[in-house]
Image (tube, rainbow, N blue to C red):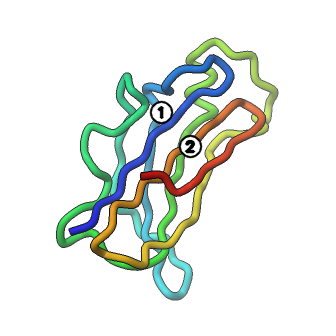
Amino acid sequence: MGYLTTHILDNTRGVAASGVIIELYKLAEDGTRNWVAKTISNTDGRCDAPLLEGDAFLAGCYELAFSVGDYFAAQGVELPEPRFLDVVVLRFGISDEDSHYHVPLLVTPYSYSTYRGS
């Protein structure tokens, strides 16, 4: 059975980003976002458990929403109002229900990147 994990790295300080609120949504065919899970990244910038696994791990389109603006504010970073990046939303697809999908986020207050990790 496949499963979904994530990892957040603070590229400004070169450390794992702990305390980031992460929400997962599954997109319906009509584009409606259906909430699936909410968690907070741990001291290693990871979730304590997979965001999706077992019977809940289904093919389809998903979104991960990372509350990075609140994270950087909590770190004492001076941010403009409105924040340039507040919630980073990554839309991605799961096509193989037997694979591990790892979706890392590398972030600063002004940029981010992602990739399909292992």
The amino acid type of the residue labelled 2 equals: Leu
Farthest residue, direction bottom: 29
Left/right placement of residue 15 relative to residue 2 reads: right
Q: Tag 1 or tag 2, which sits nearer the N-term?
A: 1
Q: Quadrant of residue 7?
A: top left
Farthest residue, direction top: 76
Q: Residue at x 43, y 70 (%)?
A: 26
Relative image position of residue 86 (x, y in whole percent): 66, 40
Between residues 65 and 46, which one lies in front from this camera angle?
Answer: 46
Q: Residue at x 42, y 78 (%)?
A: 95
Q: Residue at x 51, y 62 (%)?
A: 63
Q: What is the crowding at mark 1: few (fewer than 14 residues within 10 Å), some, or many (at least 20)?
A: many
Q: Quadrant of residue 40?
A: top left
Relative image position of residue 106 (x, y in whole percent): 61, 38
Q: What is the crowding at mark 2: few (fewer than 14 residues within 10 Å), some, or many (at least 20)?
A: many
Q: Quadrant of residue 30?
A: bottom right
The answer to whether residue 42 is above or below residue 99 is: above
Callout in the foreground (2, 1): 2
Relative image position of residue 100 (x, y in whole percent): 34, 61
- The numbered disc on residue 105 is 2
Relative image position of residue 87 (x, y in whole percent): 62, 45
Viewport quadrant of the N terminus: bottom left
Q: Which residue is mark 1?
A: 20
Left/right placement of residue 46 relative to residue 71 reads: left
